Image: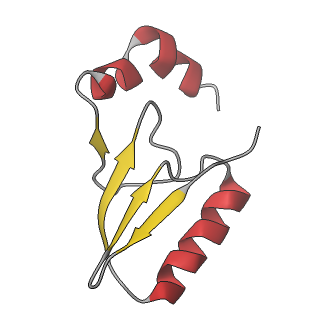
Amino acid sequence: MGDASYIIEGKDALVTMEQPLFKDNVAEFDTYLSEVGKPVEKRIMDYHVGGTGSHDVVMAEGMPEFNKGEIFGGMMQGF
């Protein structure tokens, strides 16, 4: 399973989409973000918060509840 993450660079800030899930990839991604020298304005996720840590994320309607729900949320507790 590979991570596919995106960084949209604006004039003053960054937007990330689908931040990495796996620790090695999270470390590399975070290092790169810090090297760009711009703040991350938004972190957009679909069904998992990946390596967003304690940052606020933007998700489609219903997805935060799905994340915490019995099926997906229960599965993620095993990681």
Q: Quadrant of the C terminus?
A: top right
Residue at x 28%, y 31% (from the top left corner): 60
In the image, 38: left or right of 51?
Answer: left
Residue toward you, 32 or 79: 32
Residue at x 29%, y 84% (from the top left corner): 11
Residue toward you, 56 or 1: 1
Q: Position of residue 57 (x, y in %)?
A: 30, 49
Q: Quadrant of the N terminus?
A: top right
Q: Position of residue 12 (x, y in %)?
A: 26, 84
12, above or below 63, in the image:
below
In the image, 33: left or right of 59?
Answer: right
Residue at x 42%, y 89% (from the top left corner): 37
Residue toward you, 4 or 49: 4
Q: Position of residue 43 (x, y in %)?
A: 35, 55
> Where is residue 75, by image quadrant?
top right
> Where is residue 13, by image quadrant?
bottom left
Number of numbered tags placed on the structure image: 0
